[in-house]
Amino acid sequence: MATDSADKNSATAAAILPLVGGAGNISSVAHCMTRLRLGLRDRSLVQDEALRALPAVMGVVDDDTYQIVLGPGTVARVTPEFEALVATAAGSAPGSSPAAAEELAAHGAAIKAARKAKNSTPFKLFLRRIANIFVPLIPALIGCGIIAGLGGLLTNLGMLPTVVPALTAMASGFMSLIAVFVGYNTAKEFGGTPILGGAVAAIIVFPGVANIEAFGQKLSPGQGGVLGALAAAVLAVYVEKWCRGGTSQAKRWGRVPQSLDVLVTPTLTVLVSGLVTIFGLMFVAGAVSTAIGDFADWLLANGGAGAGFVLGGLFLPLVMLGLHQALIPIHTTLIEQQGFTVLLPILAMAGAGQVGAAAAVYLRLPHNASIRSTIKSALPAGFLGVGEPLIYGVSLPLGRPFVTACVGGAFGGGFVGLFNMLGDKVGSTAIGPSGWALFPLLNGNRGLGETIAVYAGGLLVGYGVGFLATYWFGFTKPMLQELNAAATAKDPTPPTKEPTPVSP
């Protein structure tokens, strides 16, 4: 069975490579939870329709990188196979001259620059950087969150009391040092030395800061959290670049002599950014972090149903525009402060509305085998909270069903928000999953059973309203006639694509 799975992943990678222009067209390879993200030299070489037709491919997204949606679990296994194919092909490519390679790279860089200038804004570029900092942390957040939930369950059941402290250590160890990882990734993303970013961020979680007093107040270990770590690491990058002549200011004032760089630059970077962090950033970031937590609590306590309705209804458009990345530091801050984020279960209702809408589309288009096949392939992932295949493959191209899916998400979010307003906080101990995959990560201020019941109720409301809104209002009569009749006329028995198994 393991061999069959490995062969399938290898076959998927081999099928994708020629459809994206071959190894010579690949400038970078990475993956997130659901997508294979490729840097391309020449976008025109990609065969989009052929890619979408591959059984393992749930959809494609053309953004700053070319993103192929493969689903959770699958993408983590296909990516190494794809990287190996690219490396092998690049090392054995016959007859390729350096001049030709440089010309191709220059052509691809020009295309990429033109796309960036047209489609990117400074705000979206900033959000991409934020995502690049926090997204690599999500697997650890998920793993530690599930272990924390298991420890809490065992405590409530009074079982294995000797094991619970070990589970607590496993779950809490990463969270106690998350600022260090944020600092490391931040420095890496902004072009500095990652370990120096981590070193400066480590000051925030060092227990000894409790002995430091400034402005009449004593610092607390962890004060400022991930926001302070992010700011401290960015400052460290600028200090490091100044020392090494990486800015116009450094070139004007001079730089550290090369012979002394290995001694002076790291010392000045940690010293200057460390002092600013201790006597400034920790206080400011601490106040901001506290304000975020207080505002989230106030918002759901006073306007829970309305706030949940708005948040659940707007999340799909935020995902479509990439603006949901701005919420990642907020979720992480809430998890640091309260042990869970109350926003994620509400936002997860958007996926429920999407699933309900897709089910209605399936029933309303009985003769459109192409769309129904896409829905059958993407719906299992949708139940697990992976919404991109349904968004980009079904609802968004159809138009109206995307709006009705948002309506379903709004009502589901309003349901969960209402219970928050009534004092039953429903939160997630990690970010990333939604849908059914969020159940192991649920936590709150009441019993686990009640928390699960509220979240499950929200999903059912999202499914139901998304389905009904789409079934009755998702199509005009001309749309139904065109989408059903056109498919029948073109191909009475079009081939269907088998559903792709999706691992949570």
Image: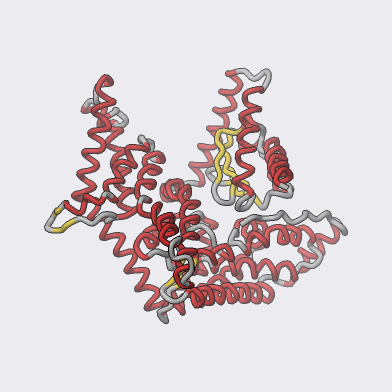
Does any portion of residue 47 appear in the rendered image? no
* Residue 407 percent across, percent down from the top left: 57, 72
User: Which residue is the extreme one toward the left?
Assistant: 216
* Color scheme of the displayed model: secondary structure
Picture quadrant where residue 23 is located = top right
Nearer the observer, 59 or 125: 59
Q: Determine the image quadrant of residue 65.
A: top right
Q: Is residue 287 above or below residue 212?
A: below
In the visual, does 225 lie left or right of 377?
Answer: left
Nearest the viewer among 384 and 328 is: 384
228 vs 165: above or below: above
Q: Is residue 152 above or below residue 377?
A: below
Q: Position of residue 122 (x, y in %)?
A: 41, 47
Q: How many marks?
A: 0
Percent x, y of residue 205: 29, 51
468 above or below 496?
below
Residue 439 in sight here: yes
Q: Residue at x 34, y 66 (%)?
A: 293
Residue drawn at (59%, 23%) of the image:
101
Residue 443 at x, y percent in the picture: 46, 69
Q: Which residue is located at x 35 percent, y 37 percent?
A: 195
Residue placed most toward the observer, 18 or 384: 384
The residue furthest right is: 492
Q: Residue at x 87, y 58 (%)?
A: 493
Locate the C terminus and report the quarter of the image it occupies.
bottom right
Left or right relative to 265: residue 134: right
